[in-house]
Amino acid sequence: MHNFAYARAADLGGALRLVDQPGSQVIAGGTNLLDLMKGGAARPDRLIDITQLTALTQIHELPSGWVRVGALATNSDTALHPLVRERFPLLSQALLSGASPQLRNMATVGGNILQRTRCDYFYDTGFEQCNKRHPGSGCAALHGFNRYHAILGASDSCIATHPSDMSVALVALDAVVQLRNARGARQIPLNDFQRVPGDTPQIDTELAHGEILTAVDLPLNRWGRHCAYLKLRDRASFAFALVSVAAALDIQEGVVQDARVVLGGVAHKPWPVPEASDLLRGSAAAVNRFREVAEAAFRGAVPRRYNAFKVELGKRAVVRALEMAASIQETA
């Protein structure tokens, strides 16, 4: 492991001053960062511990009616919080499907969003060919073992996938992340914050040097009654998604007024299906409509040698997740 200095911040202002220094990186639960450091894939010169910033652990309602989830709220506390369970059950479902209870007790909301995309060739520094670690060196996964890799939104520079379950639900819920640096604050929709690889796969998010993600804001929504998070994986727990689907429907008097479908496990970031709303709005929640959404979701898929199965698996997952959200069963 690369040698590093360590500092514990007493307040947010102090944390912002420390993280603004070259080579500094924030650490909270450490469930992703420490793995990267142990393997040599991450080499910060200084870790800034922000776990004492208790204000960032809070989950509360804002005057606007939105709900703010502090970046240091653990995944477990967030999943079980009354505001989240009552207003955003989709988020609670996604969180409880991730990792293991022990990891959820340590992992934070901010860390979950900022975790690096997953690829064995990135995590194993024995492979020199990795554009994430060595920009311009190539992508070993393109012609290697790519069962878990992206089929949507990827590029020839990188086909890694984002591992977060929570982020898939947050994108479906139109979540907005709050960012601060020593000079001010800004906010950005989560869907815009996490990036596709393009020619710069070493940059996973829009987080700038010196910034700290302080919170995630959840807007008012009508997804509480009809929503479902479906995760398909190799084993029942402690496994990343091969394909996951966050599905949410606004159904009034049997008619779909609006819809959200976001995919996980298939792209460098949570992957929205914008066609879902247009295809379902104004119609009854019916399986034939769900199949149209599924076809649209994977129309641009580019499968590789070992992950072509994700296309059909993903289509079936979309239909099933929408069925679960609508609480209907296919009879045909």
Image (cartoon, rainbow, N blue to C red):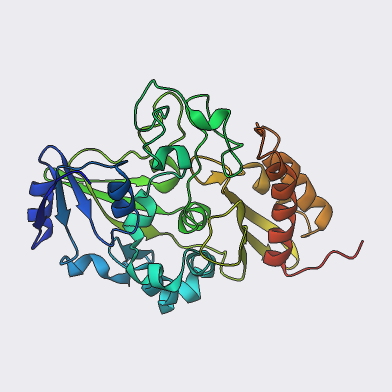
Task: Please indicate whether residue 253 sits to the left or right of residue 84 in the image.
Answer: right
Q: x, y (%) of residue 15?
A: 12, 54
Task: Please indicate whether residue 43 sits to the left or right of residue 294 in the image.
Answer: left
Q: x, y (%) of residue 53?
A: 16, 65
Residue drawn at (61%, 63%) of the image: 235
As drawn, the residue found furthest toward the top would be 136
Say if residue 155 shows up in the picture: yes
Task: Please indicate whether residue 83 sits to the left or right of residue 145 in the image.
Answer: left
In depth, the one of 288 and 14 nearer the eye is: 14
Residue drawn at (65%, 48%) of the image: 277
In depth, the one of 114 and 158 nearer the eye is: 158
Q: x, y (%) of residue 57?
A: 26, 69
Image quarter where the C terminus lies is: bottom right
Residue drawn at (43%, 23%) of the image: 199
Say if residue 194 shows up in the picture: no
| Total numbered labels placed on residues in the image | 0
Residue drawn at (55%, 67%) of the image: 237
| Up-down relation of residue 136 to residue 63 (above or below) | above
In depth, the one of 123 and 110 nearer the eye is: 123
As drawn, the residue found furthest toward the bottom would be 82
As drawn, the residue found furthest toward the right would be 332
Q: x, y (%) of residue 225?
A: 61, 71
> Which quarter of the picture shows residue 181?
top left
| Up-down relation of residue 280 to residue 78 (above or below) | above
Task: Please indicate whether residue 180 sits to the left or right of residue 202 in the image.
Answer: left
